[in-house]
Every structure is written in C-alpha cells, then in structure tokens.
C-alpha cells in the first residue's frame, strides 16, 4: 500500500518537475487524460492534419487511456451495458457466430471496427523543457498503428505491430518546447492472421478485438543515454540460504551520434556498485554486475523473499543511474526479491518447482483480465485478497499479460505467477506464420521479458500453451530469453508434448474442463486425476448466486433458463451446461426452479472443487501442481470461476478454501483413508484426528481416534474407514472429521456426504472436456432431509481488520442442517462483495454450533443484512446488532 501511494506521488512530482532545466534524468509526463477518439471512416483529413493544432474535435469522443475503442464507447455509454443479457450481440460488429473463436474469424463486413480508429492528444511542454532527449513511450498498442506528432509521421504500421510489444520512440527532434504538441495514433484491429489478444472459450470476444491503446502512454525526458529494464537475479550457494549471490543487469542506449563514456552507479540491498561504460553512437548494450567481479554482491544472511504461505515476501530496492560528466542521464528504481526459482523432473517425470530450494505444491487458478481490458486498482487489490483468502499460492496467465500494478501486487502479496503465450489462434498456427508473425513474436517476447524479469513473483514462462512451438520457433524464443537474462524456468508448453529442443515438459493439460464426480480426482490414473502437474483443469460450470445472476440475466427466475442466461456460458464445446445439468438430474434429481438449481449447483461445485484440491494435496509430490481453470472471469459467466465477475464467492470458492487449509484433515474417495495434509514448513508432532461416520438417520456406525505426527510439508495417513462400513443399507454416509491439537483446539474440521456406490466412469469415451459417467452416484436422498430450524443471531464489530459481521449458528434439533450458507446483502437484497468469510457452506450436526465471521468491504452498507439458507433450512434474514 505504501509503495502504491509513493508511486502516485512520484507521478505528480514528475509532472511538476518535468520542465525543470536542472533535471536531465528520466522524468515522465503521463499522457493519460484529455484524449479524443474517432472512427477513421468518419474523418476526412490525414494524419498530418490530425496531428496539428486547430482541428475541430468537439464531435470526437473524450476518453482517457489506456482504453480499447469499445471500452471507451462503453464508458461514454454510447453502447448499452455489454455485460447484461445479449447486448454484446446487439451492437454493430457483434454478429459473429455465438461460441466461435472470433480471433480466427475476419471482422464482419458491417463492423465499424474494420475501420482504423484515431486517438488524438494535445499537450503542452513548457519553454523550460528545451534540451535533453525525449522518448514517447507506448506500453501497448493493439494491433497496428501509424503514429504522428506535430504533423509528422514518426512510426508506421510496418514497425508498430503486435499487441504485446512495448514501443519507445525517440521524438527529440519533433517535440516542441514552449508550444502546443499534438499526438495522433491511427490504430488498426488485429486480423485473423495476427498475433493478437484472444479469448478462446473462456469468454466471448469484444467486437473490436480489443483494438486501441491498451498500455500506458507517456513522454519521457532523459539525457543522452537511457537506462532501462534493471533486473536482479539470485543464486544461493547452498540450502542454508546464508549466502546469496546477486547479479544485476540493465539495458543502456546511446541516443546520440557520438561515443559517450559514463558511469553506471547504483545501490542494491544497501550496498554500492559502480561500473564505467563507453557506448558507441546509437549503441544498445546490456550492462552486467557479476558477483565474481563485485564481491559486495555476495550478500551474507540476506532477507529472503518467499511466497506468503512459505514465509515473508520481503522486497529489497535497487536504484541505478547512468552518470555523465557528473550529471544524471537516466535512472531507474525497482523492488526485487532475493529468491531463486528452479524446477526439475521427479522420478516419475513430473515437473516439480522449488522456491529457494524448497519444494512447493502449486495450487493455483487461471486468471483473466476484463474482456474490454479495463483496469481498476481497487478491484485488483480486492481480487488479490480473495486469492490469499482461498489459500492459493499461484496465478496462471495465458496471454493477458496484465499491468505493472498486477505484478507489483503479486510481489508484495507473495503470490507466484505462471505466465506465457495463449493457445488456439495464430499464436499456435505456426505452419501459417508469415515472416512478420515471426518478427512480431520475437519482439513481443523480448518486450515482455525486459518488462517483467525483475518481479519476484514470477515462477515460470511458458513458450506455448496447448502445444509447444516447433523447434525453430522454440529455439528463437529460448535465444531471446537467454539474451534478456530471464532468471526463472521456462517450459515449452502447458501440455505434456515433448520437443526435440527442450525435451519433456513434465506437465499435462489433459482436462477435465467439465463436470466430473468428486471421486474422479482420486480414481483416474490416465487423464486429469491427481498425479503430475495439471496446468489447467477443473470440474466445469460455476453458477453464480441468484443475486449476482440478477445483475446480468434479465428474467433471472424464469425456468428453464432463458437465452440471455445461456449466452453467458462458454464458447466451443462449453456453450452448453448439458454435462453439468445431466449430472445434477441423475445424482440429485432435476431442479424445480432457478433458485433450486442454483442451490444444488453450489453444493456440486463445493464438493467437486474440494475433492480436486484435496486429491492433489494428498498425493504430493506424486502430484506436483494443479491449476483450477479458472480463478475469475472476463465478464459475467456461468463457467470456470472460483468467485464471479462481481467478486461474489459461492460454493466452489469455499470448497477450495477448505481443501487448502494450512493444516487439513480430509477423506479419500478411492481407499477410504483419512489423511492429514500439512502445507506449512513446520513439523506438527502432536495432533489428534477423530472420525465419525453416520448413516442417513444420523446413527453412528463407525468412529476412530488417532494420534498423528505431521512432518513439515507432508501428507500423512491418519487411519482408514473399513470397507464394511460402506456395505450397509444406507446409500449415503456422512463422514465428520476433526483434527485438534493437544490443547483441544480445533485445527481442521471437514464434513462429507459420501455415496456408498461411487460413479462408474466410461474411460474409453474420455475426451478433452471430461470423462462421462456410465452410472452416476446416488445422492437424491439428500433432497428428503427433514426440515431443521436453526437458532441464529448476528452482530457487527469494528476490528483492526475492518468491520466484521459475526454470525452465530446453532442446531438445537435432532436432524442434520445441510449446506448452511450465509450471505451479506443490502437492506434491499442487493449484492455486497467481496466479503471474506472465515467459512461457509457448512453442516451442523444436532447440538453443534458455529460462528461464521465476515470481513466487509469498505463500501458495505451501514446496516447490512445476513441471509441464511440451507438445503433443509428455511431461508431467513438477520439484521445484525451493533456490538458495543
């Protein structure tokens, strides 16, 4: 938080000091506000005229950047809310086939985005700004552009091409001090043969294909030599981490026609470094500070950066300057972590990652930016809170390479990041690549390596997604990564396909992506089950709450689901929820209405998500990682998320949160074993596990207590439920697990509803989406649980964490209260999110009680309401009292 405030202050300070003749070093003028936008089909003059003062632009759309064309139109409300119903289909250009991958299709002939779109910005540079060198920085342009400044074209669409490239254009001779300057950028959307931004089957694609200025734009003033992209890499001499060897890199550029000699000076982690450098005219060079040449870079007893679940994500500072004749020509400051990422293949051929030498089971989720690439700093911070609340340690980016704010938060919060290129369009259609595609791919990779390489959170870069690149392209990528000193592991792809260049990847991408019963994750031995490293998988649909659905589905309660509801499913094979819906009907019986459907869906999501993460946890390090596909959504969606587009958390979220407890007790569907998973790096030698098994009438038919010795980062078998327990008349058993320490304090509690006959899978019909069921499990008796009345009350409390609501639940009846959930709403029943709950979607046996604690968002209503619901508990509304 402090760094974000400092960053904003530095931006303001840069603007105020930009004109100072005493400042030669890298001061920056952000060019975010005051832009105008217009379709090229509606402009009758050329770039020379557009980039001069005096043009009447009153009819042009006023915008800020970064912004895609459609995001700007949406902000100005010249199009309807594109995330509601089928509005996305109702605007010009939105008529591509529903569910199709728009990246592979030509822009419709009637689309307004077939035209170029002009971005125009006027800015003043004070008279005192004379002297020095000026660079126009573009953090991202999608996809092509012609760029004009003060009546002169300074770059054209043959050199400005590629959504993932960063451009720094020398405009020293074109920018005008003491006068009004006009910048005009003519942007063009990507074609189906370009290496653009795509959405595959996660989300529909915006009709403009996200064209426009998608990154920061700024004017940077420096001296004759620029200093860019500093990086610090770490190597530990041994596992004690007592000695860290740091290597510093930075990129230098001589912007002049003369040879320049100067000094690169800096301070890193409290020590000074200095190196004399001589640069030829217009030379680019990487300057390196090696620990063999600079002994002070051998740091004794360093403060090490760790992922948050392993320790403190401590960050250090590096400040570098290029100094010529006693004057600073340019300077850069970064924060970095003293940490080392490595990977290896296990004896079974699975990719195992280590952080600072320690193995880590990757438990992650696939991340998506907003479909219109809109950014929101507050929303971003809230999502990182949710990731940590879920107890995940990793985010995966497939394309969608996010902003600096994202990576800074990942560094600060200790969240690892997997990142790399996307699948399913020109990016992986290598046999169709043009020479320009190859050039753009290499330049894009170089830009991203240099932009990102200093971030502590980065775990691995993937050069392909669904498929590895051919040998010539992989060699090209590896060459760029070596030249840019990428400090972390690389993989050829997210799939198991080996290459002749780098060999086995050690990961798999075998699905499933659609619903499978919880037992699948334990019994499967050939596909997506809990072995190896599964880079993207999950049990499919994730139905939002009724309150969320009302925000984007007109006629939410209509049954069966409307066209507007179904439009928010996925693309391709995931345009329908048939697999999920059929499983619901067979396992639990068909829903009676929308509310019933959502309630059962939440339970299915809880049960299947919990099982997936628990299975991978039990099997570590036979299993080395699992990435839930996905963590979040690009727009309001019925599939693939752990929290919905509005940051509301449902059953799947709490199943994952339960499974990823730091110390956790769990049940195994395949062999009935009880396992304690210790995800901490400390031994817990004295724990006690208790197992109770009940039939449908809550008659106890088995119990067991064991002392458990749980070593650091372990999975320990703590007993087994005998097979004969499952041979009785009851089709469903309730399994209640408890783990306590010797003081009797609860460490973990877990509750299962287990069918005595598991799903039988039709393995031969497995495809990439899922393995179908030959015979489904039988859980319909849960529909007949006798009604239970819960005693409940709630109060609000102000704490150091913020305002909390504490919900006290007690079951005074002789029946089970099944899948009890609590939700915070406004007095009008509107969504309040994100809310961080201590637990949710729980069960209470007769006489049991629980307190659920909710941390409210800052903008929560003064008098929130708590909705209590359950399968066999009548919905009720609580008005919390205010605690003294």
Image (cartoon, rainbow, N blue to C red):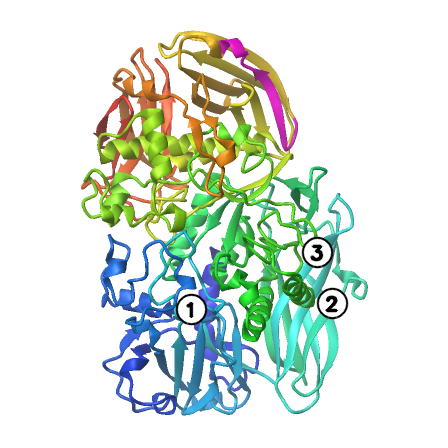
Question: How far from the left and from the top, in percent, is residue 496?
Answer: 61, 47
- In this picture, is 378 found above or below 731? below
Of label 3 and label 2, which has the lower sequence position? 2
Question: Quick one: 69 or 657, which is closer to the camera?
Answer: 69
Determine whether the residue tagged by mark 2 lies in a helix, strand or loop. Answer: strand
At 65% across and 35% down in the image, what residue appears?
Answer: 621
Of label 2 and label 1, which has the lower sequence position? 1
Foreground mark, 2 or 1, reads 1
Foreground mark, 3 or 2, reads 3
Disc 2 residue crowd, few under 14, some 14–19, many 20+, Cα 10 Å = some
Q: Quickly name the residue at label 2.
A: 289
Q: Is residue 179 left or right of residue 237?
A: left
Q: Is residue 301 left or right of residue 307?
A: right
Q: Is residue 884 visible?
A: no
Question: Quick one: 538 or 373, which is closer to the camera?
Answer: 538
Q: Is residue 69 left or right of residue 351?
A: left
Question: How far from the left and from the top, in percent, is residue 859?
Answer: 30, 49
At 63% across and 67% down in the image, what residue appears?
Answer: 230
Disc 1 residue crowd, few under 14, some 14–19, many 20+, Cα 10 Å = many
Question: How far from the left and from the top, in percent, is residue 511?
Answer: 50, 42
Which stretch did the figure color magenta? 711-725
Using the numbered discs, state the Cα–Cα distance from disc 3 to disc 2 in whole angstroms: 34 Å
Determine whether the residue tagged by mark 3 lies in a helix, strand or loop. Answer: loop
Of label 1 and label 3, which has the lower sequence position? 1
Question: How far from the left and from the top, in percent, is residue 29?
Answer: 45, 77
């Amino acid at each position: 938080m402090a760094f974000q405030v400092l960053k904003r202050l530095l931006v303001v300070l840069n603007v105020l000091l930009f004109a100072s003749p005493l400042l030669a070093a890298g001061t920056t003028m952000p060019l975010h506000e005051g832009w105008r936008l217009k379709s090229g089909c509606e402009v009758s003059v050329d770039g020379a005229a557009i980039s001069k003062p005096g043009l009447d632009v009153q009819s042009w759309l006023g915008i800020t950047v970064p912004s895609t064309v459609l995001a700007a139109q949406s902000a100005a409300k010249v199009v309807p809310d594109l995330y509601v119903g089928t509005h996305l289909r109702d605007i010009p250009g939105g008529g591509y086939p529903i569910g199709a991958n728009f990246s592979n299709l030509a822009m419709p002939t009637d689309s307004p985005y077939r035209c170029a779109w002009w971005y125009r910005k006027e800015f003043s540079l004070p008279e005192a700004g004379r002297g020095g060198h000026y660079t126009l920085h573009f953090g991202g342009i999608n996809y092509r552009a012609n760029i004009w400044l003060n009546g002169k074209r300074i770059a054209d669409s043959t050199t400005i091409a590629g959504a993932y490239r960063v451009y720094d254009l020398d405009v020293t001779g074109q920018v005008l001090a003491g006068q009004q300057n006009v910048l005009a950028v003519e942007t063009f959307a990507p074609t189906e043969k370009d290496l653009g931004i795509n959405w595959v089957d996660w989300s529909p694609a915006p009709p403009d294909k996200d064209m426009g200025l998608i990154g920061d734009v700024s004017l940077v003033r420096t001296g004759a030599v620029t200093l860019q992209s500093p990086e610090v890499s770490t190597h530990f001499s041994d596992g004690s981490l007592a000695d860290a060897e740091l290597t510093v890199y930075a990129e230098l550029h001589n912007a002049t026609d003369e040879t320049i000699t100067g000094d690169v000076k800096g301070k890193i982690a409290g020590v000074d470094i200095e190196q004399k450098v001589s640069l030829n005219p217009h030379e680019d060079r990487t300057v390196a500070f090696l620990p063999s040449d600079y002994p002070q870079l051998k740091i004794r007893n360093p403060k090490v950066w760790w992922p948050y679940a392993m320790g403190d994500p401590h960050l250090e500072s590096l400040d570098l300057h290029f100094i010529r004749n006693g004057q600073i020509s340019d300077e850069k400051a970064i924060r970095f972590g003293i940490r080392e990422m490595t990977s290896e293949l296990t004896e079974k051929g699975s990719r195992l990652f280590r952080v600072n030498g320690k193995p880590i089971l990757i438990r992650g989720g696939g991340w998506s930016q907003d479909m219109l690439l809109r950014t929101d700093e507050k929303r971003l911070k809230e999502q990182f809170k949710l990731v940590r609340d879920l107890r995940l340690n990793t985010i995966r980016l497939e394309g969608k390479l996010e902003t600096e704010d994202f990576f800074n938060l990942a560094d600060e919060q200790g969240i690892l990041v997997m990142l790399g290129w996307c699948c399913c369009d020109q990016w992986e259609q290598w046999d169709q690549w043009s020479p320009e595609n190859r050039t753009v791919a290499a330049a894009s990779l170089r830009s991203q390596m240099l932009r990102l390489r200093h971030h502590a959170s980065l775990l691995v870069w993937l050069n392909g997604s669904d498929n590895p690149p051919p040998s010539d392209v992989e060699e090209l990528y590896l060459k760029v990564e070596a030249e840019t000193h990428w400090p972390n592991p690389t993989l050829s792809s997210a799939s198991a396909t080996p290459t002749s260049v780098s060999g086995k990847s050690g990961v798999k991408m075998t699905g499933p992506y659609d619903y499978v019963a919880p037992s699948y994750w334990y019994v499967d031995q050939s596909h997506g089950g809990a072995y190896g490293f599964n880079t993207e998988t999950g049990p499919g649909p994730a139905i939002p709450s009724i309150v969320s659905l009302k925000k984007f589905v007109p006629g939410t309660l209509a049954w069966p689901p409307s066209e507007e509801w179904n439009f928010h499913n996925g693309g391709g094979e995931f345009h329908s929820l048939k697999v999920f819906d059929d499983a619901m009907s067979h396992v639990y019986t068909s829903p009676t209405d929308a509310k019933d459907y959502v309630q059962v869906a939440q339970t299915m999501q809880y049960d299947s998500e919990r099982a997936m993460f628990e299975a991978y946890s039990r099997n570590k390090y036979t299993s080395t990682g699992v990435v839930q596909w996905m963590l979040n959504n690009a727009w309001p969606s019925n599939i693939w998320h752990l929290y919905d587009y509005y940051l509301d958390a449902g059953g799947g979220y709490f199943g994952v949160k339960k499974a990823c407890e730091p110390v956790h007790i769990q049940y195994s569907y395949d062999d009935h074993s009880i396992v304690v998973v210790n995800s901490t790096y400390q031994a817990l030698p004295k724990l006690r596990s208790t197992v109770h098994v009940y039939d449908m009438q809550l008659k106890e038919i088995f119990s067991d207590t064991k002392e458990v010795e749980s070593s650091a980062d372990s999975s320990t078998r703590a007993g087994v439920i005998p097979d004969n327990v499952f041979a009785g008349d009851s089709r469903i058993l309730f399994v209640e697990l408890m783990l306590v320490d010797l003081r009797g304090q609860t460490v973990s509690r877990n509750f299962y509803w287990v069918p005595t006959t598991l799903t039988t899978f039709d393995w031969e019909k497995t495809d990439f989406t899922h393995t179908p069921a030959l015979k489904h499990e039988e859980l319909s008796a849960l529909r007949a649980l006798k009604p239970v009345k819960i005693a409940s009350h709630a109060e609000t409390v102000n704490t150091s964490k913020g305002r909390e609501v504490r919900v006290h639940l007690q079951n005074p009846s002789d029946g089970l209260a099944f899948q009890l959930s609590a939700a915070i709403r406004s007095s009008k029943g509107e969504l309040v999110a994100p809310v961080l709950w201590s637990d949710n979607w729980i069960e209470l046996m007769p006489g049991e009680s629980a307190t659920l604690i909710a941390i409210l968002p800052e903008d929560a209503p003064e008098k929130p309401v708590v909705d209590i619901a359950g399968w066999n508990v009548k919905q009720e509304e609580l008005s919390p009292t205010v605690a003294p």
